Image (tube, rainbow, N blue to C red):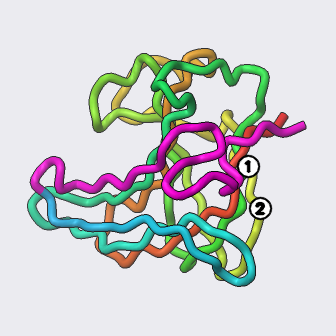
Amino acid sequence: MNTIIDDLSAPHPSAANGAVWEVISDRVMGGVSHGTITREELRGRPALRMQGRVSLENNGGFVQVALDLDPHGRMINASQWSGLELDVIGNREAYNLHLRTAEVVRPWQSYRTGFRPAPEWRTIRLPFTDFTSHRIDAPLDLSRLRRLGIVAIGRSFDADIAIGGIRFFA
């Protein structure tokens, strides 16, 4: 059983869950990375596409597309789910999926796992057990989940990744 977070049925930049996708880069902290988020058709299906350049200059190093899991920014309880399932296509670079909970209060904190999208559409499953804490001591509390981000991070490269859907899986 799955629960849809976004199936690209809502007008861009809205998600099916009523929240709005946004692009964020290290420029908020003085970096020079840049990115865009577009809605387009890729290989015969609708896609939310993030493209950009990740740069380590000025202590930077990330570009992400982020989405609140509730349209009003409230927490959701995802403890009945096993993880997140993504329909994804990309340039074979390494990307992260970051989660934020109520305990995550600093911009550099998250729970994260990595994946590499192929140049063909694939469905990947990212179990919650694969997520590790980053610069936070609190364990991942799925009953207090707030936000997710698909992130190009940590090295200089050209980011090009698209999501055709994202949902919880049991």
Q: Residue at x 64, y 78 (%)?
A: 41
**Is 56 drawn above or below residue 108 in the view shown?**
below
Question: Label 2 near label 1: C-beta < 8 Å?
Answer: yes
Residue type highlighted by circle 1: Glu
Q: Give the crowd class for mark 2: few <14, some 14-19, many >=20 residues within 10 Å.
A: some
The quadrant where residue 115 appears: bottom right
Which image quadrant: the C terminus?
top right
Q: Residue furthest front?
A: 11
Residue at 56%, 64% (x, y): give it: 48
Q: Position of residue 93 (x, y in %)?
A: 50, 73
**Residue 35: x %, y % from top left:** 33, 67
The residue indicated by pointer 1 is 85
Residue at the (41%, 73%) spot, across then down:
51
Above or below, comparing residue 28 to residue 105 in the picture: below
Residue indicated by mark 2: 123
Q: Secondary structure at mark 2?
A: strand
Q: Nearer the viewer, residue 20 or 109?
A: 20
Q: Residues within 10 Å of mark 1 (few under 14, many from 20)?
A: many
Q: Position of residue 39 (x, y in %)?
A: 54, 68
**Residue 44 percent across, percent down from the top left:** 74, 81
Check disc 1 and report its element: helix, strand or loop: strand
In the picture provided, is 136 more to the left or to the right than 133?
A: left
Quadrant of the rendering where the N terminus is positioned = top right
Q: Which residues are magenta?
A: 1-30
Q: CA distance from mark 1 to mark 2?
A: 7 Å
Spot the residue most to the right: 1
Residue type pointed to by label 2 = Thr
- Mark nearer the N terminus (1 vs 2): 1
